[in-house]
Amino acid sequence: MKHLTPEAQMTLLRTTARAGIGRHLHHWLVGMAVMLALLSLWLWHPVPLMIAVFLGIIGLVERRAVPNILNAVRAYDSTKPGTGTVRITITRWDSDDHYHAIVREAGQSDWAYDFVPQGWQPDEGTHSAQIWRLDSGGSPALSAVSAGMLIPRNAPQQLESNT
């Protein structure tokens, strides 16, 4: 895997956000899934149904990914980061890894979220981090450690207040 610097990762994210790629992709995926399911019924053939199930699951699971990327770019471009720590843990399954982060910043609540690293390989442990939020006291829109960016895959979960 080629490792990208955090700045290169943000450049790629900014380009994607400007192009509007995927803003409504999850709607298109679910719509195509419905159309393929109907085609499967009309043709009485299982292949379009299998593709429909795949596209439908991807569309439903990833419906938060693009809004989170857009929020991360907006927070990076419009707010100053705070400093804190991110504890990264990795759950290893047979064929893939799942990445989890706990974000801690003085004067803020602790937040947990899953993320998908893009262009870097996270190491488990606690790392110094910069943390961007769209509003004071809100969940982190973006965190960055020295090796890469962490964007929430789904809605971050508030843990405990450390204020």
Image (tube, rainbow, N blue to C red):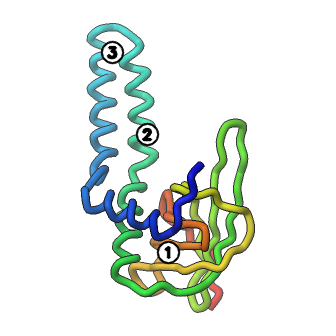
**Residue shown at 57%/86% (left/top)?**
83
Q: How far apart are labels 3 and 1 at the CA level?
A: 42 Å
Task: Provide the secondary structure element on which disc 1 rests.
Answer: strand
Question: In the rendered view, does 37 fall on the left or right side of 82?
Answer: left
Q: How far apart are labels 2 and 3 at the CA level?
A: 19 Å
User: Which residue extends farthest top?
Assistant: 44
- The disc at residue 34 is none
Residue 27 x, y percent position in the rendering: 29, 44
Task: Provide the secondary structure element on which disc 3 rests.
Answer: helix
* Residue type beneath disc 2: Ile
Question: In the rendered view, does 26 fall on the left or right side of 105?
Answer: left
Residue 135 x, y percent position in the rendering: 40, 83
Instruction: Name the residue tied to disc 3.
Output: 40
Closer to viewer: mark 3 or mark 1 = 1
Task: Provide the secondary structure element on which disc 2 rests.
Answer: helix
Instruction: Name the residue tied to disc 1.
Output: 140
Quarter-wise, where is residue 96 in the image?
top right
User: Which residue extends farthest front?
Assistant: 2
Closer to viewer: mark 2 or mark 3 = 2
**Residue shown at 29%/8% (left/top)?**
43
* Residue type beneath disc 3: Ser
- The disc at residue 58 is 2
* Residue type beneath disc 1: Pro
**Residue shown at 36%/18% (left/top)?**
48
- Camera-nearest residue between 13 and 109: 13
Q: Residues within 10 Å of mark 3 (few under 14, many from 20)?
A: some
Residue 42 x, y percent position in the rendering: 26, 11
Say whether disc 2 or disc 3 marks the residue closer to the N-terminus. Answer: 3
Say whether disc 3 or disc 1 marks the residue closer to the N-terminus. Answer: 3
